[in-house]
Image: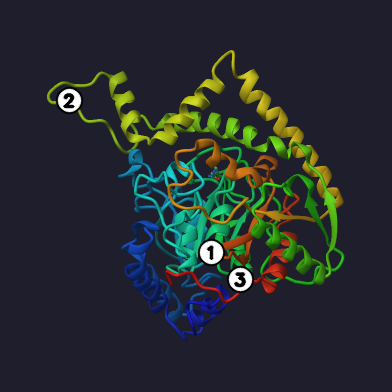
Amino acid sequence: MDLLTASFSEISAAVREKKVSAVEVTKFFLNRVNRLDQHLNSFISRDETAVKQAESIDQRILRGDSVGALAGIPFGIKDMICTKGLRTTAASKILENFVPPYDATLVERLRGAGAIVLGKLNQDEFAMGSSNETSAFGLCKNPWNVEYVTGGSSGGAGAAKASRLTAGTIGTDTGGSIRQPASFCGVVGVKPTYGRVSRYGIIAYASSLDQAGPMTSYVSDAALTLEVICGRDPMDSTTSNQAVQAYSQNLTSNLTGLKIGLLKEFLTEGLDSEVNKAVDDAVAAAKRMGAEIVEVSVPLTSLSVPIYYLIAMSEASSNLARYDGIKYGYRAPTEGSRELSLEEMYSKTRGVGFGSEVQRRIIIGTYCLSSGYYDAYYNKACQVRRLLKNQSDEAFKKCDVILGPVSTTPAFKIGDRISDTMAMYLNDIFTTSTNLAGLPGMTVPFAISSKRLPIGIQLTAGHFQEQTMLNVGFALEQNSLSKGERPNVY
Ligand code: GLN
């Protein structure tokens, strides 16, 4: 079996049938991390227990115990997600030595299904960014061309998956952080419906928007991973009771009877011509597979970036108040023999521990929440968000899935946008409305630009319509123009 191209179900079946051991699979990927990550910087921490975890899966199989659907599949986990006994930094100096005493629910579920944790992946600091350039552990490079960004904030997850340093990765998506790096790195990435995956143990950025999801080589791998990580969790009261479907069993590329919507507001003139062409080609492919194409409109999409940044920064300023040098991670040292006052300690800890983008967002978010401004900013943004959700509910009465671009351009060069904050925020123009409306969204790799950079297609669906969305993804995957293309770092 070629472990570079095998699907999750092929690997786990081979592990269960003892054709290959979980230890062999794990060592195969660990060797790749050792050999290739020096070119990318996609890992922040390696899990030294990976081989031991694999041994215990192999022993369970030898004893005849049942092992789960992901038996022996190595995963890299974004460093926003708590892993028991394994450092979890959110790519921030303020958490550089934080070792969680528990696993996030989704990690517990992955382990329960037999998956192996290889390590923790690079990202923008506290998931704030669209290029992975704000990490306190150094930026992560795009494996297709190391002069380009991976996208963000789950850049390490995109890069590690694209280069096959691990079989699967898990990212988080608050405003596009799974879908945009998936597009820039040429992998599948799924952000589930809000409430589908437990947020327990995920470091909070903007709690009303955050969701975690898989980044994989194939749609079927993402579907299988979702079956494991989705579902009600008593530790997260926003998780839904709705039953989780057997997504991977029900995949079909026959789109007959499905209506695919083209969002008027997404077909803007500012779109790069190659991205535009990829969208046209994807529409043609969807038609060939039986879908009917309709035009839909969600006028408030035009306000999604300002609404998103108001809400995300406000919630972040509140969530990040806990990092004060007392309970977690980094604390500013005393100055010689002089003890700092409490207030000095707070302000030095936060001034040194947080990077500049995180500080900017805490300051703006605090302003938006302060008395006198709350109604004008945070509250107003929440009201417009509700109207946006209503409009998108209407749009999904006219179609099953919306197809469009993930980003206006393929990956951009390292350094190109980092000092232009507005340009960086405008990256999220096609991804934030999905989070604001709480909808599922995904990226399917579809084309390659003339500079040999990947271009993904974005799909979104109504609440809890993951299966329909995955089916369209599955159909596009079979028609993908980037099939068989490999990144340079491979
Ligand atoms: N780029 C967006 C931001 O900076 C989205 C990040 C995310 O989804 N975590 O907030």
Residue 325 seen by the camera: no
What is the quadrant of residue 40 in the picture?
Answer: bottom left
Q: Residues within 10 Å of mark 1 (few under 14, many from 20)?
A: few
Mark 1 highlights which residue? 451
> Given contact means CB atoms under 8 Å apart, are the residues at marks 2 and 1 in contact?
no
Q: Give the vertical position of 152 relative to 249 (above or below).
A: above
Residue drawn at the location 49% of the way across and 41% of the way down: 128
Foreground: 382 or 459? 459
Q: Which is nearer the N-term, disc 2 or disc 3? A: 2
Q: CA distance from mark 1 to mark 3?
A: 13 Å
Residue drawn at the location 64% of the way across and 51% of the way down: 196
Q: CA distance from mark 2 to mark 1?
A: 52 Å
> Given contact means CB atoms under 8 Å apart, are the residues at marks 2 and 3 in contact?
no
Q: Give the vertical position of 368 relative to 174 (above or below).
A: above
Foreground: 126 or 304? 304
Q: Which is nearer the N-term, disc 2 or disc 1? A: 2
What is the quadrant of residue 438 in the picture?
Answer: top right
**Can you give x and y, in whole percent of width and height, for residue 467 in the image?**
72, 61
- Looking at the rendered structure, the kind of residue marked 2 is Glu
Residue drawn at the location 32% of the way across and 38% of the way down: 329
**Can you give x and y, in whole percent of width and height, for residue 16 in the image?**
50, 80
In this picture, residue 47 sits left or right of residue 200:
left
Mark 3 highlights which residue? 482
What is the number of the mark on residue 335? 2
